[in-house]
Image: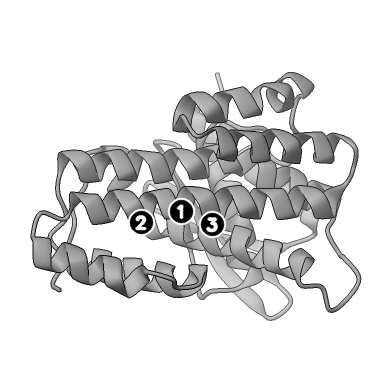
Amino acid sequence: MQSYQEKITSEVLVYFQRRAFYHEERVEDGCRSFVVKSGKDSCYLKVYDTGRVLVQGAESNLRTELLNLKSALESGGDVGVLLAEDINQLGGKVLTLTGDVVVAEYVAEAVRCLGARALVACTFLLGAASEKAIWHLFDSYTQAITDPGKQQAFATRIKDKKLLAAYKEFKDSFISCNYRPSNPALSTDLEGQLDSLFNHYRISRNQVGHPKVPPTQEEWQVKLSVSTFYQYLHTIYALAEEFGLNAPSPAR
């Protein structure tokens, strides 16, 4: 019987082949380790005995793509290929997860656009849903800070800020807490689970929302963005819930 590590690795290799990525396997204890290259970009991808996937490397389009792949694999999703029943249920699943009608409707509309191959519209809608969810995370973090002075200071720093500036304020404040989530799923590679995907959806939306060149979205890329979006939201809302149980204590 194929082990979980073998199953994940086989999907990774198929993905590399489909994307024509140069890859070279290196022997390491307890994992299958690959050097992956695309143009000038280079990253490491490791598949451990447990099925956990780790992506390492400098910020690049390749790293973002491999992090999307990681999320799809670890959430049990089919890489780049969504079943019709999964697509149709995604809006309802998001509503159950978030309780936010706006986020759920934007995701449901993104799915309808994907089905119609309106790839630019789908990309924009995912970015809008991501922004709404991220502001929920900021609000949850603010409300959970127990020191009134620090709570007010943080709220003031993000007030009226554009999304990226507010995210940087949140990230700096969060790092200053030396926060240790009690939820094991949030304790490993949180930056990869949240930071890179946030930037992927933000940048993708900006590229189609403020166009300077003709759209270049490929269907497989947009499908992958949709397939990883639920897990991305799950991380955001799990972390927001964690703040309510385990209050952050930022440096300022």
- Does residue 197 appear to the left or right of 156 in the view shown? right
Q: Position of residue 77 (x, y in %)?
A: 61, 32
Q: CA distance from mark 1 to mark 3?
A: 11 Å
Q: Amino acid at mark 1?
A: Ile
Which quarter of the rendered picture does the N terminus lie within? top right
Q: Nearer the viewer, residue 203 or 180?
A: 203
Mark 2 lies on a secondary structure that is: helix
Residue 162 higher or lower than 52, as above or below: below
Q: Which residue is mark 3?
A: 197
Indicate which disc, 3 or 2, sits on the residue closer to the N terminus.
2
- Does residue 7 appear to the left or right of 208 in the view shown? left
Q: Nearer the viewer, mark 3 or mark 2?
A: 2
Q: Residue at x 45, y 75 (%)?
A: 165
Q: Residues within 10 Å of mark 3 (few under 14, many from 20)?
A: many
Which quarter of the rendered picture does the C terminus lie within? bottom left
Q: CA distance from mark 1 to mark 2?
A: 6 Å
Q: Position of residue 2 (x, y in %)?
A: 56, 24
Indicate which disc, 1 or 3, sits on the residue closer to the N terminus.
1
